[in-house]
Image (spheres, rainbow, N blue to C red):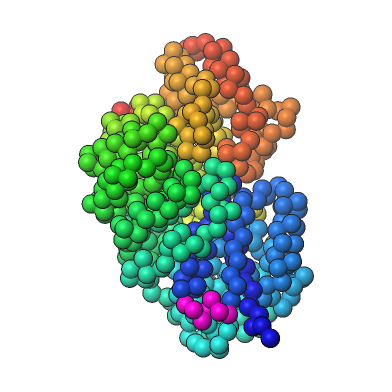
Amino acid sequence: MTNQLSKAILVGIAGSNNAFSLSLYNLKAFAYNVPEIRAKWDLSIIQHPLINVNRKDIEIPPLVGRIVESKPSLVGFSCYMWNVNVFNEIAKALRERIPDTKIIWGGSEMSSDFLLQGKFDKFEMDFCVSGEGEVTFLEFLKNQSFGVPEISSIPGLAYRDHSSGPFKINSKREALEVLHDVPSPFLTGVVDDEVLLRPKIEANIETQRGCNLRCSYCTYHKDMNSITYSSLDRVVSEVVFLVNKGVKRVRFVDANFSSDLNYAKEIIRAFIEKQFELRLMFELIPGFIDEELAALFEEFSCLHEFNDITLGVGVQSIKLDTNKAMRRGIKIEKFNYTFNLIKKHNLFAKIDLIIGLPGEDLIDIEASLEYMMETVRFGQGHLLCFHVLRGLPGTELLEIARKNNMTFSSEHEPHVFIESPDLPRKDMLKCLRRTAVVFRLTNHRGWAGREFISERKSEDVNIRDAFFNARERLNLTNVELVDLIVEALMEHLKERNSWFVQPDFPFAETWWWNFSAFEVRNEWILDYLASLKPQSGYVSSNAINPSKV
C-alpha cells in the first residue's frame, strides 16, 4: 500500500507575460528543505501570465479547470493589488466545484494591518499568511499533516474556525535574520525548466528584503522592520545557474538594490568578472548611487552588445512637502544628482511618478511632469512610467486620505485613487490623458529603443525626439504641447470609441501599456507634430521652467 501525498497547488498571476512569482518558489524550496514535508506533500506551482480584466470570462475558466483536474487538498494564491480581485473570482469558482479543498492566501497585498482591519472577511479563503511567508507556510503544512504546531500558535497566520465566521489573527511573524536561510529555488531545482525556457522570460531574483524608506503609502515596511541580505556567493551562483539555462534577462526584485552601496558594487564587480551576457533591471531610491557604482553599471553594459542595465528610479513627486508628508523626504538635489550620474554613464532609467498624492493639485503634478520630461529629453531615452495612487489597506496613507476627503475605487483593481478636493475628477482625468501621451512618447519603441524585453534594438522612428524638436520650434512648454496632442487624440480616436475618449477614461494604465500602440501609429504622431504651426499667445498659466524647479 502506497502512502499517497497530499496535493497542494500554489498559483501566481504575473503582472506581465514575461515574469513569474518568485515568492511561490521560495515557499516550496523552504518547505521541501524539510524531509518530513517532502514525504507528505506534493507541491505544484502554476505560473499564469497576466489576466486581462476585459477577458476574465474567457481566461479564468481554463485556469480553474486545470486546478480542479489536479484534485488538490490545498490551493494557495500569491496576491498583489493587480490580481487580488481576480483571485477572489477564482477562489469562488473553486469553492463551488471542489468545496472540500482548503484555500490559503498570501503575498504583499495581505498585510498584517489589513487583517486586523477585518478586510479579508469578504474574500473566499480559509487561511491567510501575512508578512514573510516561508516559515509560516512550513508550520502550516506541519499542522495540516501532523496537527502540530497548533493552528492558533502559528505567527503570521489568520484563519477561520468555520466558513462564515470572522478571521482569527495570530501574532505577527518576525522577519528572517538571514535571507539565505531560505534555500535558493534555482539552485535546489524548484524552478522548473518550463518556466525558465519561456520566450523572453524575466527571471526574478532577490539579494535582500526590506527598504531604507518608510513611505506612508507602502505596506512593505509594515512587516519588514530591517533589511536582511543574501550572501554574495549565493547571488552569483543563482545568476550563473540562470545563464547556463539560457536566461537573458534578470530582474532584481529588491526594493532598493543599492541600499548598501558596497554590497551592490561587490555584486556588479562579480558580474563583470564572470563576463555575463545579460540584461539586468534594478530598483533604486534616488540618492543611493555614487560615481563608482554608476561606472560599474556602465562597464557591465559595455561588456557585450546585448548587455543593458535598466534602473527603476522612484521619483513619485518633486514637491518636497509631498515627499515629507509621505515620509520620503527626498529633495530635488538627490533627483538631480542621480539623473546626472545616469546620463553621464549612459544608463537607462525607468522613472516612476505617482498621480494623486495627498495635497497635490494639477499644478503640482504638472511641475513633476515638466521636470521629468526635461530629464527624459536630456538623458538617454528614459521611460516615464505613471502610477495612479493606491490607498493600500493597512497604510498610514489611508488616515491621511480620510483627513483630506480623498476617494478611492475598488471596481477592477482595488484601492485606486479617484479624486480629492485638491485634485477633482476633471483634473485627474486631465492628468491621466497627459500621462498617457507622455508614456507613449517615451515608450514607443519598447523602453525607448533600449528594450529590456526585446531581442533586438528597434529601428522605428524616434517620436520622442520629434516631440522635443516640435516643442522648441513652437516655443511651448512640454505640457503645453502634450495638451495639444491630447486634444488632437480626442478627435482622432472618437470614431474608434477608444477608452481614451471615454468620459471617465477607465483602465488608464491598461491603455498606456497595451492599447496605445494599436490605436495610435507613430506616423500619425509624426504627421500631427509636423502640421503644428506656432501659435501666438498660447501660454499655459501653469507653465514651469524646469531649470528653476
- Residue at position x 55%, y 58% in the image: 192
Which residue extends farthest front? 1
> Does the stretch in magenta take in 466?
no
- Residue at position x 46%, y 71% in the image: 30
Residue 199 in the image: state x and y as whole percent: 57, 43
Front residue of 251/187: it is: 187
> Does the stretch in magenta take in 37?
yes
Residue 503 in the image: state x and y as whole percent: 67, 38
The quarter of the rendered structure image containing the C terminus is top left
Front residue of 514/17: it is: 17
Residue 221 in the image: state x and y as whole percent: 39, 63
The quarter of the rendered structure image containing the N terminus is bottom right
Question: Which residues make up the magenta segment?
Answer: 34-40
Front residue of 224/181: it is: 181
| Residue 385 visible (yes or no) | yes
In the displayed structure, does residue 143 sit left or right of residue 100? Answer: left
- Residue at position x 41%, y 68% in the image: 182
The answer to which quarter of the image holds residue 410 is bottom right
